[in-house]
Each structure stands twice: as structure tokens, then as C-alpha cells.
Amino acid sequence: MPREVPIVSFVRSDGHYLARDGKRFFPIGINYLPSYLCGNHFADYRAEHIQADLDRLAEMGLNSVRVAVFWAAYEPEEGHYDEGFLRAFGTFVEACRARNLMVMPVFLIGTWTGMYDAPYWKPPGMYEGEMVELEARHIASFVRHFAHDPAILCWDLSDEPYYLEELPPSGKRRASGEDTPSRQIAVRWVARLVAAIREVDKEHLITLGFDPYPVNTNNGFALEEIAEHLDVMSYCIYPWTPGRTEVELISYGAFQTRFFAAGKPPFLHEGPGASSSSASEELLADRFRAWMYSSLANGTIGVMPWNYTDYEEEIHSRWPLEEAPLEPNFGICRADRSLKPRGEEFLSFAADVRRLPLDQLTLDPPNAALVYPYDYYERAGRLHDALWRQFTLAKGANLNLDLVREDRLPADAKLLIAPGSRLRLSTWAKLRDFVAAGGHLLGLVGEFDFLNPLFADLFGVTVEGFRPGSLEAAFSRPWGDLAEGQTCTFSGSANRLWGRPAGAEVIASFADGFPFFLSRDLGRGRASLATVPFPALVALDDPRGESTRVALGILRGARDLAGCRPRVDTDLPWVETALFQSQGSDDWAILVNYDRTPADGTVRIAGDYTGVCSSAGKPLAATRGEGRLGLPVTLRPHGAVLWRLSRT
């Protein structure tokens, strides 16, 4: 199998992807733990076994590994460093270098299969005071030994630090409007650790390993401010959320990629990951495929599943596996190094990534955005599920969508979706200006404090109340592909905005006569409003049901009226598309089926293309009409394809 060039230069970031030796470099790697030990293998370094593992990784075509530097192993006593650990780690790096595998060390382990790593503790805790200086000294001491080694991919400050110790709940913001103390503490902590590395190493990139916790829980880590101190943002994909439908679970890959980017390149440094005990191997392989291609379609710069191999059965009853019954079989390989179905999908994905001429490609940037409030993190426990559900539906309608905080509205967006939670008054003024300048704003009424002094004039509606009511709706005017007379009944219950049109056109009404969906021209743009948070009322366990079809139709209609129709589009719900534009002759497209049901329909591609072929080079039947190429597509459950679009 062709191997990459020897490791002779440091990895850089060009703002979109990583680069090495003047060429873009996409880490296709793995989180490495050997099958014989769930723990610190540098203290039990079985060279023959580890070299056989690395041979297998090289044979698979991987280019990087992520490994834990356990604090207690390297610095068992304060200020005393284990030279044996350093020698074993250096031996590991050399073995990786010989196989063209880069190494990504991670410090301050919050959790690594249930292992929490802090050998000593100083008040007031790990984020302030003396403890921070001890952490900085610990990391810098290790980094100093490998600061000039280009075989190091990047430094990972911590793996999910909030499992070592949580910041105090962020609570309310200060009366002056300053950020909460927890936010400030987290930013200062990251900045100090980064500075400690920069004192001894000005070459390597720096990141921090997050799981979904900062996005779904109030824990003080505001990603946008943290990102300002890091070179790349690292995140995980794990299907831990119970009670979710398949389309929601698959959408979480894109959701995590977009949310954790926070203005920096997003790196799937730990994931996908799933225990073989949690679902069938067939289903997990299908999910892995969809998550990986969807992450690529949404801008990830690397993929490293958790983890390499299952553990040998004889150590299942030892700590920490004894107390972690899902953990023994997360591997993409079995304990005998044979590939599981998800491992086969990973290698197929890796082969497709290698086919992409990344140096020549630019991923089409989002032209729409879902706006979340500045204090989202303080309200994450209440807002996360609604935001995720709204994002899921938007992807089901094939929007090229970003997630943006209200203080960072994109200047080039054509469609902004305000998802029903409280926003700042200054943001509403910006949204009004956005519409006046030609943008399309879609408001989804949710919480009562979504209302504001600009609301009535912006959306052309008078407000008469906010309370429950009928959820049976009918369209009196067409909207996108929703025809006049279309009806639907949303499930569940929710407060509705009771209002009357005052400048807006009623598109659909509830059975009691009050508007459900309105739209108006304002300035050079358009403002549309749903008077009920319909994404929360859609039965996604039936992703092709009536209420879902109406919800997707509303979003597609807003997308097309705003001029956001993607260049690669389809008549299929729940199929995401993405386009890589080339500086050369050929572009590349990705299609991902979020649904567990096979997708069979038509894809339409705008542009001066003359043909389409699979990533492996097989020509596909396509015909031209109405300025677009059209071709049939069939995607298996959670299927994904990579196409090459030719101009010659």
C-alpha cells in the first residue's frame, strides 16, 4: 500500500486544514490502547506486541495515533519525573516514526476508559491558584523533551478536563454584563497551559479534547473564547443519548462538527466511538459511515475513532473495565487485530479521503446559520435539545448550515434562523438590518422572552397572547413545495404565539383561525415567522410522516427563497449534500443518508459539469436539463458516496 512521505516537518494549520511539507495533511488515525492493558502501557511496554499493533495500523493505511500521558505515571511525585516513562514514550515515538505514524499526546486525563488522573491536589482546585502552575510545569516538562520532534502531530492539553473536576456552575452573569466567573476561569486556565507550552515549544499545534459535555451542560467552558487560544478545536462523536431517533443520532455528527469549530478548524480527535454491546455490528458500521462522511462534509480536518482494539477477555474483570461494562469492545478491531465491520467502513472512508486532492479543494462555506444566544452555555441544559432538533431538521432539508453565537453573526449569510430562545436586543437590531439589506430571517417562536420591542414590526404581526392552542394547521398559500391546502397536525403540546397579521402575509393558519406561519417583505429582504416551535413537535420516529414533511417543506421554502439552494441538491429528505470546489478542473460532492431507510431518488447538480463518476472512477449516468445535471441515486441505510464532478 502506498505510504505517505517520511515525517520531516512540523504540522501547520492553513485555517481550513492541516498541512505538512507544504501539502495538506488529513489525520486518519486511531486512539491507541493495546489489547493487553486498559491503562498506562508505557509502564508495561511490551515491545513485540506494540510493534505488531503499529505494523497493523500502518498496513491499514493510517497516519496517526493518539495516546495518553498519564500525570501520575510521568510525575508520580510532585516535581519528580519518571525517566523510564520518557524512555518508553520515546521508544514508542520512534516506532511510530518508522511506520510514518504521527503521535498525538494528551495530558491531564479527565477520563480515559474511566481512569481519572491527578496524583496530588491543591486547593482551590485544578483551574485556579497553585494547581494551575503545577499543571503548567508538568506539561512543559514533558513537552520540552519532544519540542523539536516533527513526529508529534500536536499537543492535546487535556482529555475532557471537567471529569477531573468541574468548574462551579456558571450561574447568572454579573450585573455589569461581564462573563460569569466560570467562563473567565476556564479561559484563563487554557491560556496559562498554552503559554506554558509556548515557552518551550513554538512549533507544534495545540488543542484541547472535548466531548459533548460543554455543549449540553452548564459547565463554564464557552467554546468561542476557548478557541481563541487554540490552533484547532477537537471534539468527539458518541451515540450516548437514549431515546433519540436515527436521523437525530446521525445529525449529531454534523452538529458537533459545526458547534465545536467555533471559528477554528474542527478535528474529530476521538470518534466515532461505540461499544459493540450497545447495538449490532451492522448498525454501528452504518452509523460510523454516515458520521464520518457527514463530518467531512461539514469541515472536519481529521478523524480518529475510539479506539483501536477490543481488550482481551482475561482483563475484563480488572479495573477499570470491571466497572465499565460497555468499554471492553469499543475497538474497530477485535482483540486478535481482525477488522470489525465499522473498521472496514473506516478504511473505506480513509481510501476516499486519500482520493481527494485536498490541496486544490475548498469546501463550499455555509450560506445559512442557526443563531444561538450568547448565554447559551449557562442555559445549555434547557436549550441543547431544542437546538439539536432544529439543526437536525435543517439538515434534513439539506441546508448548508452553520451554528453561530449571536455576537458572531456571519456577514455573508443569506438565511438566518432565530430558534426561539431569548436573544439580546442589539442582536434583534442587527437581524432587522440583515433583513433590510436583503437577507431572509426565519423566526421560530419558542420561549416567551423571544418577544422584544422590534418583534411586531420586524415580522408584521400584532401579539395578543402566548398560550397553548390547536396544533392543526392548513396552508392557504403555497410555500416552496408545500401546496395550498396542505394540512398537518403537530404532536405534543406547546405554547403558541396568538397574534394577527399587521403587514405580513398569512401562509398557514391553525384550526382556530390564528396564524401558524407568516412572511413579509421588509426592505430588500424577507422576515418569516412560525408562531409555534414546530421542530419540537415533529415526530422524528417517522421521518417521512406528515408533520415532518411540512416542517422540512417550510425550511426548504425559506432556503430557496433566500437563494440558499445547494449546487448539489436532491428531492430526497434526510440526504445531506456538500460540494468541494476545485482550483483545477474537477469538483467533488458528498451525499449522506441520515435515515435508516434506503433513499432512492434524483440528484440535481448546478454548474458546467460534463460528467459524474464515483470516487473509484466509475462513470455514472447523468443527463443535462434546466441548467443542471440530473442523475438517479440510491443510498443504502446511512449510506454515503463521494462523487467526482468533471468539467472536461
Image: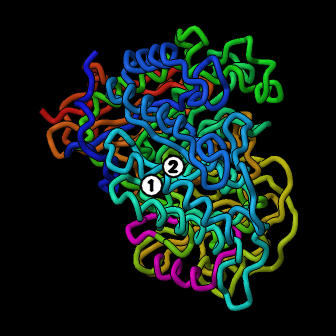
Q: Nearer the viewer, residue 112 or 343?
A: 112
Q: Nearer the viewer, residue 418 or 464?
A: 418
Q: In the image, is residue 112 above or below residue 424?
A: above
The image shows residue 131 at horizontal and vertical percentages of: 67, 64
Q: Secondary structure at mark 1?
A: strand
On the question of residue 364 being in view, the answer is no
Location of the N terminus (image quadrant): top left
Q: Secondary structure at mark 2?
A: strand
Residue visible at 19% across and 32% down in the picture: 646
The tag on residue 2 is none
The image shows residue 329 at horizontal and vertical percentages of: 68, 20
| Residue numbers of the magenta segment | 410-434
Query: Cα distance, mark 1 to mark 2?
Result: 6 Å
The tag on residue 206 is 1
Q: Give the residue type at disc 1.
A: Ile
Question: What's the image's color scheme?
Answer: rainbow
Q: Which residue is mark 2?
A: 156
Residue visible at 56% across and 64% down in the picture: 190
Q: Is residue 106 left or right of residue 323?
A: left
Q: Nearer the viewer, residue 259 or 127?
A: 127
Q: Give the residue type at disc 2.
A: Asp
Q: Nearer the viewer, residue 174 or 251?
A: 174
